[in-house]
Amino acid sequence: MKQIFLVEDDREIAKNLTLLLQAEGYGVVHASGQAEAAAMVEKARYDLALVDISLPDGSGFVVCTQIRQMQKIPVIFLTASGDEASVVTGLNMGADDYVIKPFRPRELIARIQAALRKSGTSSGVTEVCGLSVDTGSGLVKKNGKEIFLSALEYRLFLIFVSNPERVITRDRLLNELWDAAGEYVNDNTLTVYIKRLREKIEEDPANPVIIRTVRGIGYRLGGNDVSK
């Protein structure tokens, strides 16, 4: 799973971007300022960085320089300013691209995918619970054979793949699916999609071991310590 390093001080924007990126199958690590970003770059490796130019304790330009010194990954600037000077400065500092706020979600995803392809890090296959998930091509395979998932089923599965150690509440699934699909998903519809997804990925849908139910809370990916 590709890891995106998000440096953004606006909590609402950071939350929405995290939901969007996770729905696309990316892992997201968030820093809210220059100092926090500097510390986090030293501790972990990432595949791409999304960096807001204007930060409360410094500048995204400085963060870009720090990232470049530590890791050779694509950097995309997020900026509310479309002035030529900021754009040129960012590109001259080694940024791979820039996106002006407000931006369309699909445009941002396309820019990220293009930057990852250019850097040669876009192809990646995740093995989870006996399934193969290629987030670059959107293919899900079981025993070497492709499983055909609808767009919403695929997004639902990616939420679990992106959060392998967490119990995910039904409310969170509803919020993320609604945000990602651009349409209203109610509680009954979620139950239907969970059932359909299990029918496609589980060996025995009546006794699921991949998408497990945590009674009274929600679901989690795999695990032996929860009820089916």
Image (cartoon, rainbow, N blue to C red):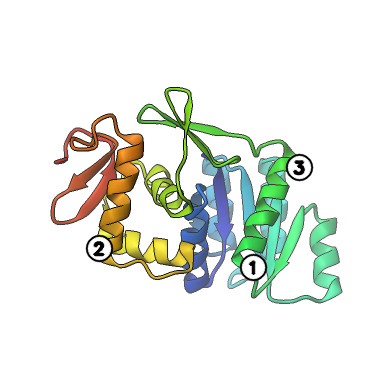
| Corner quadrant of residue 80 | bottom right
Of 226 and 47, nearer the camera is 226
Of 203 and 26, nearer the camera is 203
Residue 99 in the image: state x and y as whole percent: 71, 65
Question: Is residue 24 something that shows in the picture?
Answer: yes
Quadrant where the C terminus lies? top left
Determine the CA span between mark 1 and mark 2. 47 Å
Residue at image position (45%, 52%) is: 155
Which residue is under mark 3? Answer: 118
- Amino acid type, mark 2: Asn
Determine the CA span between mark 3 and mark 1. 29 Å
Of 211 and 185, nearer the camera is 185
Task: Mark 3 vs mark 2: give the one in front.
Answer: 2
Left-right relation of 185 to 22: left
Question: Is residue 74 something that shows in the picture?
Answer: no
From this viewpoint, which residue is outermost toward the top?
Answer: 143
Mark sitting earlier along the chain (3/1)? 1
Residue at image position (23%, 31%) is: 204
| Residue 58: numbered disc | 1
- Looking at the image, residue 59 lies above or below residue 157: below
- Amino acid type, mark 3: Lys
- Contact (Cβ within 8 Å) of mark 3 with mark 1: no
Determine the CA span between mark 3 and mark 2. 42 Å
Which residue is under mark 2? Answer: 188
Residue 217 in the image: state x and y as whole percent: 18, 56
Mark sitting earlier along the chain (1/2)? 1
Mark sitting earlier along the chain (3/2)? 3
Residue at image position (50%, 47%) is: 25
